[in-house]
Amino acid sequence: MNPTGGAGNNSGQVPSQDSAVSLVEEGNALEEQGRSSEAMECYEAAVRANPRCARAHLNRGNILFASARIDEARDAYQLAIDCDPTYAAAYFNLANLNCRAGEYEQGLRQYGIAIRIKPDFADAFVALGNALADLGRSAEALKSYQGALAISGEVTGQIPRPFVTSLFDDYASRFDTHLVDALGYSVPRLLREAASRMVRNGARFQHALDLGCGTGLMGEHFRDLVAEIDGVDLSPKMLEQARRKHIYGKLDCDEIVAWLERAAGESVVYDIVLAADVFVYVGNLEPAFNAIRTILPSGGLFMFSVEHLPQGSFELQPTFRYAHSSSYVCDLASKHGFGIELSEQIDLRKEKNTMIRGQIFALSRL
């Protein structure tokens, strides 16, 4: 690799400014291969070729930041901004660095500049929300997460993890009583009744997985029907509540699709997978269906609820929850090797004194 010019350039001359862009692209390709030191040589050569190359300064900063060379990285990001005061990514990366260093006020200001330059910068809204949450400014954090949702929720098919975590951490201590008593939530009970109709002669499931287990409401309803149950949830505080009930064999704090994909790669097996009021935060269900298929044996059950969408596939509602159509779920079931054992329309819970309609499904792995 020769970052100072072509293969035959041994003159030691500084490359022409026209070569800066190609040097940055070469450096990017090397970074993708994990060859960071060689990539840095390219970026430094690009800076020599064109000291006003903002991308080269930014990429230098990224490598320095990853190497914990904080002061040098900060200088590189600032040079990128000096070269291009409208470079939103440079403000964003500098904000990330400052927040990591505990300099939150500077970071908040820089996230704000990045968003003003690029109003559809969803990652900046999420990062700003994270920083505000770290500072205990929950209401402002949620507003920032909502900004990210308004931009990316429909496109990505998934509500940003920090939004869900913050929401349920704040809700954890009053979750059970508020959801069941005030909102009339009955999905765990209805799924349990449906499961009872599908087993005979007092049979029990050996190993259950409760996705988005929250405080353990599903575990409470299913514990007499399963020998062992594991749970996964994004909210540490919800998991604290679930742990106190002594229902679960294992509880993991993770995003459910990431956890499922990892479990699929590790050949983990469950004979029933449960997901009550979880997919309202995951619009595109295909990755989940694909991973769940791999952890269920033939005949294993996949039981879950969704909010009802009359037509289409999935749609982000004004409540920042997704609704899914029955036809979408049926198409996914067919595509991923599931048979539909049960599909029932139900009342999910109250929303402003109106019951939200939904469906529960029981699918069997073919």
Image: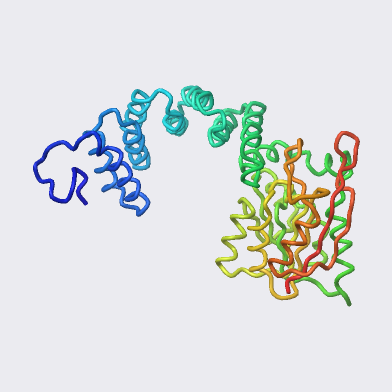
Relative side of 215 to 43, left or right: right
Where is residue 184? Give x, y as percent.
89, 44
Where is residue 13? Give x, y as percent.
12, 37
Relative side of 2 to 296, left or right: left
Where is residue 180? Give x, y as percent.
86, 44
Position of residue 97 relative to residue 225, above or below, is above
Q: Is residue 106 visible?
A: yes
Residue drawn at x 32%, y 36% is 56
Depth check: give the residue in front, 211 or 223.
211
Residue drawn at x 88%, y 57% is 190
Relative side of 102 to 188, left or right: left
Depth check: give the residue in front, 131 or 122.
122
Depth check: give the residue in front, 183 or 22.
22
Quadrant position of residue 316: top right
Position of residue 52 relative to residue 348, above or below, is above
Q: Residue furthest front?
A: 18
Quadrant position of residue 90: top left
Where is residue 217? Give x, y as percent.
79, 52
Position of residue 201 relative to residue 224, above or below, is below
